[in-house]
Image (spheres, helix red, strand yellow):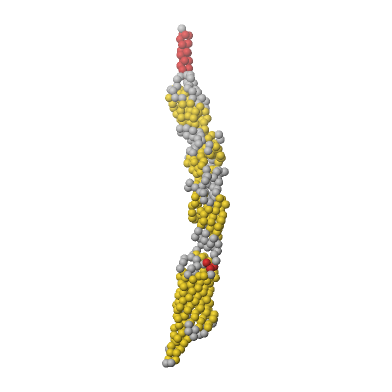
Amino acid sequence: MVLAAGLVVVLAVAGWLLWRNWVPSAPGSPSSQAVTATSVELRWGPSTSGPGVDQYLVQRDGAQVAALGATVTSWVDRNVAPNSAYRYVIVGASGSKRSAPSAEVAVRTLPAMPEALEQKGSSATSATIGWAAPARGPAPEKYVVSRDGTEVGTVPGTQTTYVDTGLEPGGVFSYVVVAATGANRSQPSAELIAVTLPAAPTGLRASKVTTDAATVQWSRPSGPQPTGYVVLRDDTEVRTVSGTTLSYTDTGLAPASTHRYTVLTDLDGLRSDPSPELVVTLRTPSVASGHLDGSWPVDGKVTDVTGTVTLGGSAAKGQTFGWTWDFASSCKVGPCAAVVSGVFASHPFSVKVTPANGTYSGSTNVHISHCQGLSGTVDVKNTVRLSLTPTRSGLVSNIWSVTSWKGTLVLTSPYTAAGSSGNLRSYCPANSLTASVAATR
């Protein structure tokens, strides 16, 4: 009896000890079902023996990160960084009892996808795209660039631009970028639509050049039909012509001037780079076609005297003069009639000179010389003839203008009555003076 009672006690103690140490079996191995840059989804099998669990505890890198209900066998960890490695185990809990940990699952989150894609530049055959580096997590090893669904290049993870070359002018292309570390790739970025510039015109040439105009021609570039061409002279837009027009005549230019021409292709408002530059120098007009106008310092010298010419004193061969003559032209450019207002021997005169065969000529009647007669000094009404020939022309304020001329001034005096005294009458004989005149400015 004593032995039987002792056996009962021993069995009771052993049962109590066995019950005390009885724990749930380890949960099934977790698996990562869906991994993104910022989340990890885990699933596992339940504990199948031992006391029923009332919780599943999720441990990440040795620290508990979640406590879940007894019927929950999946969980999404949203507190993770992109492109980072983590280790997970699941522990079953029954009250204070803990199962052995499940098998471990190692997970690496995806790299963060590139953001803020933008086109940073383009040419006729290339497009430059850029993006923002991930704000969280380590930098990826590289970025993979795809165009129209096909991978076209990679750049290191420290670089956030890519230049895609060998493209068609005036093309439209779709780009996405993926961040990658090893075989681990981010989700694709948002799509970027990029365009290349139209190709610039080719074969720029001058087909006709005159003294005041130039015709520029070019050849149509490759790519789509342009909607227009923009012509620039000396970096300033001067005209836009239609996409079917391959020439432009630039008029109203200064003679002998030099200009730089470029042409841009326009495709629905998108402009090409400039064409290669064409330098055009307009033809130099003749000296005689210069415009004669303005104020001139004139040098004069008597070259011949016939008779006696009195100009406040007798004029003699070799005598020199210095005057200022003003020319008032009847036009703004080119040779045309002008009124010359000047002074000769302190006497003003005005002569209209008209160009013909490269020489300006004209005459007027005006008092300049004097005659001494019986009644005293008599004013003589002279004829003044001017003949002026331009000797040099050049650009003055973008107008082809005379810059130097020479010629002659002929002063003639008619036979003139000089008064009487009683039966005596006095006369001044006809005479003339010829002076060379010249001016430069």
Between 227 and 257, the one nearer to me in the picture: 227
Residue 342, position as x, y percentages in the image? 46, 75
* Residue in the image at 49% along x and 33% along y: 36
Count of numbered circles on the image = 0
User: Height in image: 12 above or below 308?
Assistant: above
Q: Residue furthest front?
A: 423
Name the residue located 46 percent from the left edge and 31 percent from the top edge.
Answer: 77
Please name whichever residue, 161 or 266, is drawn nearer the observer in this view of the structure: 266
Left or right relative to 67: residue 105: right
Question: Considering depth in this image, is 412 or 68 the residue closer to the camera?
Answer: 412
**Whether residue 237 is situated above or below residue 336 in the rendered picture:** above
Q: Residue furthest top?
A: 1
Residue 42 x/y as whole percent: 48, 28
Residue at the spot 49% in from the left edge and 50% down from the top edge: 242
Between 175 and 309, which is closer to the camera in this rendering? 309
Expressed as whole percent of the image width and height from the top left, the position of residue 322 reads: 50, 77
Q: Position of residue 309 (x, y in %)?
A: 49, 84
Quadrant of residue 151 within the rendered picture:
top right
Check the image and name the residue furthest to the left.
Answer: 422
Q: In this rendering, does residue 80 appear at all?
A: no
Q: Is residue 184 visible?
A: yes
- Residue shown at 45% from the left, 32% from the top: 78
